Every structure is written in C-alpha cells, then in structure tokens.
Image: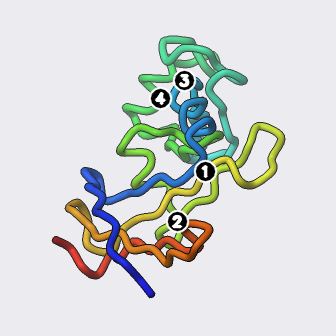
Amino acid sequence: MKTKIGEILLDTGVLLLGDIANLKKIKQEKHQITRIFKHKDTKTLYEQGKNFKKFTDILLNEMTVNELIEKEILVEQQHVNDFDLSTENVLNDLENGFKQLKFETGVNGKAFAVNSINGEGFYPVYAEINENGIEQLVIDFTEKE
C-alpha cells in the first residue's frame, strides 16, 4: 500500500536524486563548462581553453575574442562538458525533463536530475513499505501542495 511519508520542496523545480556520498562529492567538485564559438563565415570552431584562454586574447590576428563576439563574427555554441549544478545550467541541461549524471569514468549512477512538470513548490512523497523497509518511492509532481 502506498503511504505518504512526507513532502519535498523544490525551489528550482528540479529534484536531484543520488546517494548522499555522491551528492556531497558533486557539491565539492568544480564543474567545467567548455565554451565553444563558431566563426560565422568559415564555420570554424574555437574552444575556450584550447584555442584561447581569456576573452581578451587576440584571435585570428584581428581582434580580441570579446570584440569578435560583440561584432557577431563568433557565435557561441555553448557545450556543457560536465553537469554544472548552478540553477541556470541545471534547468537548461535537462533533456526530456531528466538527466543521468555520470561518474568521471563515464559510468551512469552518480545521480539523477528530474524536472517537475509544475515547477517549484512542495510535492508529496509516497512509499511502498514492507517488513524490510521501503521498496518503492514515488514523488508525485501532479499533486503540488
């Protein structure tokens, strides 16, 4: 039988599920965002950290990266290299409303992010409980409290 065991508050509308040890590591890790830009005419890609280090660097023997971006010669094609836990990037990085976070080795299971269909708010948490403990956990995003 499904029993309500509590509720969870989502301030961003995104729930991060994972083992507490992995979530603690995720919080401590420095996540890298690789910024990639495409030249509007040549379609050549330029990657921050690879083709230039700072936005004040001169690129293509013409202008700084900032000037090339300002003049729309370089167009950003942002690519998140790792899962960035800032609110903006979490919301933008969820494909189909969820994302599997991988360990550094590429193996799944580090954590899982889920976007609620009703945004921020309190949501009920239900469990199927047997004599050994919880066998199923359900967070109902349709029952915003």
Q: Nearer the viewer, mark 4 or mark 2?
A: 2
Front position among marks 4 and 1 = 1
Quote the CA–CA distance across marks 4 and 3.
Answer: 35 Å
Q: Residues within 10 Å of mark 2 (few under 14, many from 20)?
A: some
Which quadrant of the figure has residue 105?
top right
What residue sits 27% from the left and 68% below the top? 123
> Sequence order check: which comes first, mark 1 or mark 2?
2
Please count the marks in the image.
Answer: 4
Amino acid at circle 1 = Ala
Residue hosting label 1? 111
The amino acid pointed to by label 4 is Leu
Quadrant of the image occupied by residue 141? bottom left
- Hey, which residue is sitting farthest left in the picture? 145
Q: Secondary structure at mark 4?
A: helix
Mark 1 closeness class: few <14, some 14–19, many ≥20 residues within 10 Å: some
Label 1 and label 2: CA atoms lie apart by: 11 Å
